[in-house]
Amino acid sequence: MNARAPFGSGRGFVDRLGVRLGLVIGLALLPVGAMAVMQASDLLTEARARSEAALAGETLRAVRPKLSLIKRAQGAAETLAALGPGDGACTAVQRLADAGGFAAFAAIYGTDGRALCRAGAAPDSFGGQRALAEMLTGAGPALSVLQGNGGLTLVALHAVRDAGGVVTGFAAISPREGTAPDGAERRVDAADFSLFVFDPRGVVLTASGGAARSVLPAGLRLEDLAARGGATFSATSDGGEERAYSLVRLVDDELYALGTWPAERGRLMAMRALPPLMFPALMWSVSLLAAWFAAELLVSRHIRRLRSAIRDFAGGNRVVRPLAMRSAPREIRDAAEAFERMTDAILRDEAELEDMLREKEVLLREVHHRVKNNLQLIASIVNLQLRRTRSEEARTILRALQERMVSLAAVHNGLYQTADLSEIGVEVLFPGIIEQVTRNAQVRGQSIALESHLQPAQLTLDQAVPLALLLTEAMSNALKYASTADGSPPRVCVSFRVETGEAVLEVSNSASGQATVVDLDSGGTGIGTQLLRGFTKQLNGEFNREFSGGMCHLRVWFSLVPRAEAA
């Protein structure tokens, strides 16, 4: 019968219930994790956009006083230009440049660049000719940014026109710092905020709070930013810090302001410090741990207990202890109860089968015992008949018949005495037969030198009966023809050995004289030879006889049938 194929022999880590359950739950949570990753990424993007928008507002708030001052200067220049050259304009110039007034410098110039009237300190590097050229080309109002010894100077310019619209000169006003209207001056209190004011050439004119140039964007020149115009962006600073930048044009092609602060502030910085995948991965790991713990608490430990009980029972342990499954799920409790009912049924059936087998064994032993007794009884009857028979031929026939019955009785006696009624050992069967045949020869007054060499082997009942009868015939034949030339007791040797799966029975006797040789070579047509051939055929074996070294050898060899096949 073929062995049943196992359900599976894998004992890897993935084969555990808790691991598989965790993987299934983790796979189920994978879409949620993907959504969490996208939401985290969107949150970071939105937070950065808000940070940049807040920076733009902070920058505008920081430059609002400057813008307010510029607009007021441009309005004053336009008003002064509307008065035209004359006493009224000069009075206005003087009033604007008075101590504590709005303008640090005010003037009206002619088209030739000559000052018609002026008040206050003129800027150190004021270039009236360039501004005048712009007015004459129809450039309209203008604002110049001058860098002098006193620092940054703003000059608002506006053309003076006559009634026909012809340019007759221009008005110039340089506003005084700190004269912005109420509400324009506002203090920027962001500790990490820095503001730079620079010209189109990239020269930093002012820096708020003594801001260091290390906070400026790395790899970007200020003149390139001036060419870009207003923008809000994020970049890495020269100091290696991720920062947000906001660029504001104060005066087109003249003056720019750049505000900056760290791109990651407060909780945003803490979020950016962690990868977006960390929170979903952490959630997934926690789900795996929870699944493993749930599987271990609810299922795995109960299944291991049930598996251990099943393995013990399958291994032959018939002591079935109650399983503690009170806290197990109902399905596992049902399986445990089914296992207990199954083991009870199997134990009950095994007990009944053992009782039946024991009864059959007792009966079979009784049968072998009775058969042995009956054969011995018949042999005894034949022995009584031998005593009354006067014919030597009849006595020989009856004696041979008696020996065969004794051999059969020895087989049944050996089976009666062995534990396994289906097999008998050579070492149990052969000694009794050899002893019985030898005793009969000694009764007849024949002296024999007997040798036996028996290798242990198990014989089935189908092998034991013909082999026992074959041994009886072979020994009877050997005793019949055993002889020696010097009158010493003839030798008879019996050996049984197993060679490469084949059993070999050899019976040898000493032989001398041509009569023995002729008898051996005569073809063997007697009943003994016929019986030997018949028994050998029953064993599916072969036999031969040969004479060598003063000994006659009879050999029989046959295959030993494996016990499993015999069953």
Image (tube, rainbow, N blue to C red):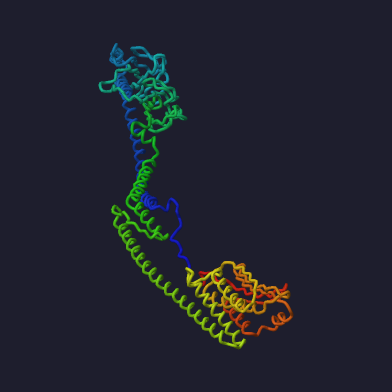
Q: Position of residue 452 (x, y in %)?
A: 62, 69
Q: Is residue 345 left or right of residue 15?
A: left
Asked whether residue 292 is in view, the answer is yes
Q: Nearer the viewer, residue 246 or 267?
A: 267
Asked whether residue 82 is in view, the answer is no
Query: Residue at the bottom extreme?
Result: 391
What residue do we see at 66% from left, 73% from top?
Answer: 508
Q: Position of residue 223 (x, y in %)?
A: 45, 27
Q: Nearer the viewer, residue 41 or 352?
A: 352
What residue do we see at 34% from left, 19% from top?
Answer: 171
Quarter assignment of residue 158: top left
Q: Position of residue 125 (x, y in %)?
A: 42, 16
Is 102 placed above or below 34 here? above
Q: Is residue 22 left or right of residue 505?
A: left
Query: Residue at the top extreme?
Result: 99
Quarter assignment of residue 475: bottom right
Q: Nearer the viewer, residue 125 or 423?
A: 423
Q: Position of residue 251 (x, y in %)?
A: 37, 25
Q: Is residue 333 left or right of residue 401?
A: left
Q: How many marks?
A: 0
Is 444 placed above or below 280 here? below
Is 101 placed above or below 12 here? above
